[in-house]
Amino acid sequence: MSRLDDSLNAYAKVRVSVSVDTRVMAQVRAAAQRRSPARLGARQLGLLLAGALGVVLAEASVWISLARNVRPPHLAPFSHAVLQLLFVSLRLVRIVEQLLGAVAAATALASPLGSAAAVGLLLSFVSFMAVRRLRRAAAVRGL
Amino acid sequence: LDATAERAAIEQVLSGDPEPFAGIVRKYQNLVASVAYRMGVRRTAIEDVASEVFMKVFTRLHQYDGRYALSSWIYRITTNHVLDEIRKRRHTAAQGLDDLAEPRDTRVDIVGDAEITERDELVRQALYELPDDYARVLILKHFEELSVLEIAEILNLPEGTVKIRLMRGRERLKKLLERRHPEHFAEFAPAARES
């Protein structure tokens, strides 16, 4: 065996003892926690759902109130109200999205299918309300 | 933790319970620390490097397919991690791994390093200047005393390729040493070889 081999093999005899298991496990637990976010408690979930329901009701009441107040002779206020309604609706839709997102992240809705279903429900609701509003407006114009 | 318990622990970790990973860490922490130290990581940085290696093992555990022993897979992660760190830090600050660690109390016990000579250290430093392909096989062969078959398994290479890289790596290492430190390695010079 050459002297080069002697030098290279000199390190093979070195052995090191450490104790990093406590430290590693603390990091591992933190990483595992990040992978699966903490589930919301029943109270938090209830609050989120109540908030989402409140926003939905507010949205519905805005649409209903507009539909009830629209009169053909008042065209300018009508346009103004539609614009205002669009702004309010956009805000409300964003809030609903955020609330549903938080609920979805904490429940089985976190799956792609669940997210798609939540978005579908939201779109259905908005479409339904829009159709209702258009029908009501058409009826009002027909008066 | 025998092989069966090890497999069960891996499955539990993969199913979302991180606690059995502690058994894997306890079983292989000395192996990882020894490999890191032999590859040039200094005493003050060993715990940091070992922790980083185990975090890589944890995050990549789903990639372990069980074809080879878990120790081989951890070997590969450790050698790749240390070589990457050495090269990264050499490019950024020309510092060794030891210079970047904060001096602090450590529970690292090292056995057998008293016999390391200055010449041995020069050989090790020169080893890291070789291309990765050669450095890896030489480290596993000489520092870890693994067979060609074991090296082939760890690096996922044919045995013939490992043998060729060992031979070429040694030749390159000799040339590098005789050029860089002729006072220590004159015996590698062509004239010395011919005589």
Image (cartoon, coloured by chain):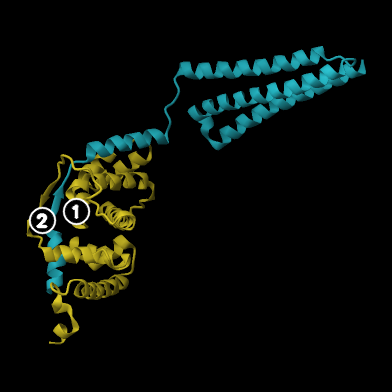
Chain colours: A cyan, B yellow
How far across and how far down the image is residue B101, in percent? 23, 46
Q: On the same chain: label 1 and label 2?
A: yes
Q: Earlier in the sequence, mark 1 or mark 2?
A: 1
The residue at 14%/77% (across/down) is B186
**Tag of residue A92:** none
Q: Which picture quadrant has residue B142?
A: bottom left
Inspect the image, locate mark 2, and give the three-letter code of the amino acid beneath it: Asp
State whether residue A50 is above or below residue A100.
above
Q: Which picture quadrant has residue B105?
A: top left
Helix, strand or loop at mark 1: helix
User: Label 2: how many residues lie within 10 Å, few (<14), some (14-19) or many (20+)?
Assistant: some
| Mark 1 and mark 2 residues within 8 Å of each other at the beta carbon | yes
**Tag of residue B37:** 1
How far across and how far down the image is residue A59, in percent? 68, 18
Residue placed furthest toward the front: B93
Q: Is residue B16 left or right of residue B82?
A: right
**Image quarter in which the N terminus of chain B is found:** top left
For mark 2, name the chain.
B
State whether residue B14 is above or below residue B146.
above
**Tag of residue B113:** 2
The residue at 29%/48% (across/down) is B53
Helix, strand or loop at mark 2: helix
Inspect the image, locate mark 1, and give the three-letter code of the amino acid beneath it: Tyr
